[in-house]
Image (tube, rainbow, N blue to C red):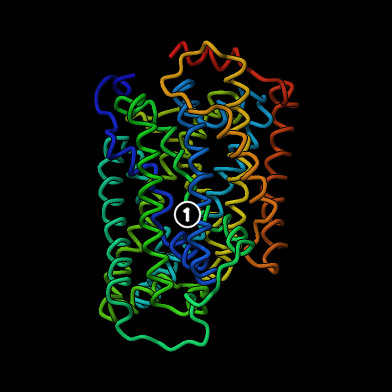
Amino acid sequence: MAEGKEGGKALPLTALIATAVGVVVVQSTMITMLNGAGIGGLNFLIAIGVSALLALTYVLSFAELALMLPRAGSVSAYTQAALGPGLAIVATLSGYVAVALLGIPAELILVDNLLARVAPGLIAALPYPSLVLLLLFCLLNLRGIDLFAHIQSALVAIMFGGLFLIGIAGLAGGASDPVASPAPAAAIGFSAPLALSLVALAFWGLVGLEFVCPMIADARNPARNLPRAMLTGLILIVAVYGVFCLAGIAVLPAETLTAATPHIDLALAIFGPAAKIAFAVLAILGSATLLNTVLASVSRMIQGMAQSGQLPAWLGRENARRAPAPALIAFAVAIAAVRAPLGMDASSILTLTVAAAGCWLVAYMIVHLDHIILRLRLPQRARPFRSPLFPLPQVLGILGMGYVFLHIAPTPELARPIYRNVAIMLGVTLVYSLAWTLFVRRRNPFRPDLAGALNEHDSR
């Protein structure tokens, strides 16, 4: 596995790191993290630390599983081998496809709202310019993995540089035009219950590092670079959002941090009105990073599911450039179909993102269980990477994520809509999973397919 397919162009470590962090250096995550800082003040930094420990557990599990069963299906492949096709479909569709179908449209709404503030004439001529951005990155991903790598590395480098600059400038100089506030975020006192209640919100900023796993067939030296990419990505994310949130707490009042677009307010408070266009470009580049990562990774998850018989077979095909063209086009069309009816309302972003984090937590707990089962069932299986202290990280990950899921709402009034969204996503995917496996595939949805997973891997 030293090279990618055909032994030619393969993703280097820098491109793998860029893929791992590509779903979090985006507008919706900036907003979510600043909202958390506004709700909890410095308590939110404790929440980020706890979330980082939980994220480390899933990184360890994914690194071992991805290198033991290096398939494009990622979580669907691991779960089918350990727990059967039924839960494999639920874990992948609810934890990745359904989450993307909520998260990406939310991000596109933010793009359109930002453009409405800085270029109202464009919105008048083209109501939803974000859909043009979606089309552009769909077409670029159809060109294959090499172009993806160049675009992704450049976008992520710009985003990290921009966020660090905002954070450091905010801490060094504060606001250029400070606004007095009766409720500064920095004045919120220490509260362990408050910090723990914000872990789910902070965790949203640390999810998605495993998006690099479906790219394993195109990775250069994956046995070394895949774990390094996820671990390096985790460190970078904690650092950049720690500094970013500290700047928000230092510069903005709590009521501004909990508003709909605090990331824009923070940039304007630090650099003044002249920064509006520059920050708009930075924010849109962040949305482009998200689109590029999710379209590339989730389309390969869909392709892997189709190749495993969990989705219609036509979604498993590739074009001449080895891009999963049918899955990619179908996924992009589905995102556009969800985005178009939502209009320009950005008020529900927090509820959607925390609900999506809840579904991701369920998927991660399933992956931890996959890891434990496959380590016990296949003790002699070759593992280029082995999670240390097994099964302690996995058990702690399941318990910690379960606790966070049960206390997921950052404020009491958000609990009902958050759990409703989670229930809808899990319920729909469970119904599809049972119908597909029982009536189309005519298989037991809960019977592990260990032999099938190993045979497919060994034949590659």
**Secondary-structure class at tag 1:** helix
Residue at 55% across / 43% down in the picture? 97
Q: Quadrant of residue 158?
A: bottom left
Looking at the rendered structure, the number of numbered marks drawn on it comes to: 1
Nearest the eye: 211 or 434:
211
Q: Quadrant where the C terminus lies?
A: top left
Q: Vertically, is 386 above or below 107? A: above
Residue at the image point whose x is 67% and y is 20% from the top: 448
Residue 56 picture location, percent across and down:
48, 41
In the rendered image, is residue 458 in sight?
yes
Q: Is residue 337 toward the left or the right of residue 131 in the image? A: right
Image position of 249 with respect to 328: above or below:
below
The answer to whether residue 134 is seen in the rendering is no
Quadrant showing the N terminus? top left
Q: Nearer the viewer, residue 239 or 161?
A: 239
Where does label 1 land, which residue?
A: 205
Left-right relation of 347 to 133: right
Query: In the image, residue 150 lies at what x, y percent?
Result: 25, 42
Quadrant in which residue 270 is drawn = bottom left
The disc labelled 1 sits on which kind of residue? Gly
Residue 82: x, y in percent?
63, 23
428 displayed left or right of 135: right
- Viewer-proximal residue, 45 or 140? 45
Q: Residues within 10 Å of mark 1 (few under 14, many from 20)?
A: many
